Image: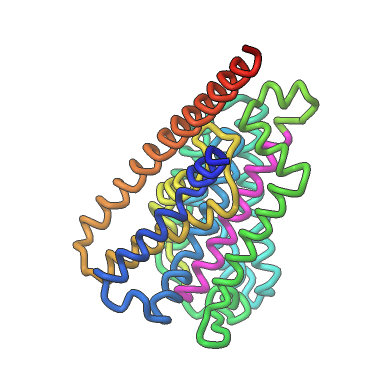
Amino acid sequence: MLTNLKLKVIDNLIWVILILLVIANAFITPRFFSAHNLTNIMYHSVVLGFLIIAESLCLMTGNFDLSIESTIAFAPAIGVLLMTSWLPGFNPIATILIILAIGALIGFFNGVMISYLGINPFLQTLSFLIILRGLTYKLIPMSIFQLPDSFIFLGSKKLAFNIPLAVFVMIAGFIIVHFILSYTKFGRNVLAIGGNERASFISGINTKKVKTIVFMISGCIAAFAGVMAIGRQQSITNKMGDGLVFMAFAGAVMGGVGLNGGTGSALGMLGGVLVLGVIDNSLTLLGVDAFMVYATKGILIFIAIVLDNSKIRLRENLILKEEKKKLGHAIELKT
């Protein structure tokens, strides 16, 4: 019973960290607990939250997707230009659907190259990160403003008590991911492939197809994150999402998604989002130097890697001790 409790704590360590961070900020950070600031943390975590979902799904299969950092800007750039320059007056809702389709298409190409042609996922997605960012700079050298209200609605609309609609959209996203991972065959296949791809293939899972679909979902979610970012800032820039892939990686791993695949939960991902959001917010309120904020982000990535390694070792040691205890008990009964 005690071992199970310890395992639960290890698996949900991110929430322990979050509670400690909140308690610490209550004493050292001015205005941290104001309703406005707590809402602000959630609102400014939305875009990163969706990128963490996208990265987590790839990590669960034992892969990763660096290209989401550029997909977040490239796919919306095509949509915005279609709506404002190429076909002025084009339907904003149809534009959003096209943006999502472009993101899925990018993910499909990555998935095919990695799953069917055996290209290294780091090299494949890194190349697309660079290609798509370069194309984005070419397409929109200057920021584009004055976008239709129906296009920026999801990212800009405020509801009762001035709570942004985007916060509820993000929470809905995590609920959907939880349902998929916990209650669908596809979700179980994703985790199974990350746990042991060869065994999954032998058991009848079409591993290549599942991985390709995961990359498609990742690209689609990254494109949607771009739509949310445009709504929040009410414009599109060619540097949108720059550097966020590393924080998405850190948030996913800190939230319990294993570097080697096969583990992870939507609740853990959400914890990772909130921890990063609280840290970023507290550093801003404390007036920490911008260069130190950048260094802190690097430290967070390091911590994520150490946490992942430590949790694996702690889990293995606890399970080993429990097995030894059971074995010792069985020997005592026999004698």
Task: Give the residue at x 33% y 74%.
Answer: 32
Q: Please name whichever residue, 326 or 164, is drawn nearer the observer in this view of the structure.
A: 326
Query: Per the image, is 244 magenta?
Result: no
Establish if 37 lies above or below 200: below
Whether residue 84 is visible:
no
Establish if 104 lies above or below 168: above
Task: Give the residue at x 55% y 71%.
Answer: 167
Q: Is residue 33 left or right of residue 122?
A: left
Q: Is residue 284 left or right of residue 229?
A: left
Establish if 279 lies above or below 127: below
Query: Per the image, is 233 magenta?
Result: yes
Where on the picture, by quarter, is residue 177?
A: bottom right
Q: Is residue 66 left or right of residue 62?
A: left
Q: Quadrant of the N terminus?
A: top right
Q: Please name whichever residue, 272 or 314, is drawn nearer the observer in this view of the structure.
A: 314
Establish if 237 lies above or below 305: below
Image location (x, y in percent) of residue 118: 60, 24
Looking at the image, the residue that sits furthest to the bottom is 161
Image location (x, y in percent) of residue 207: 71, 30
Q: Over which residues does the magenta segment extend?
A: 209-234
Image location (x, y in percent) of residue 24: 30, 64
The kind of secondary structure the magenta stretch mainly shows is: helix
Image location (x, y in percent) of residue 258: 52, 37
Q: Quadrant of the C terminus?
A: top right
Looking at the image, the residue that sits furthest to the front is 335
Where on the picture, by quarter, is residue 39?
A: bottom left
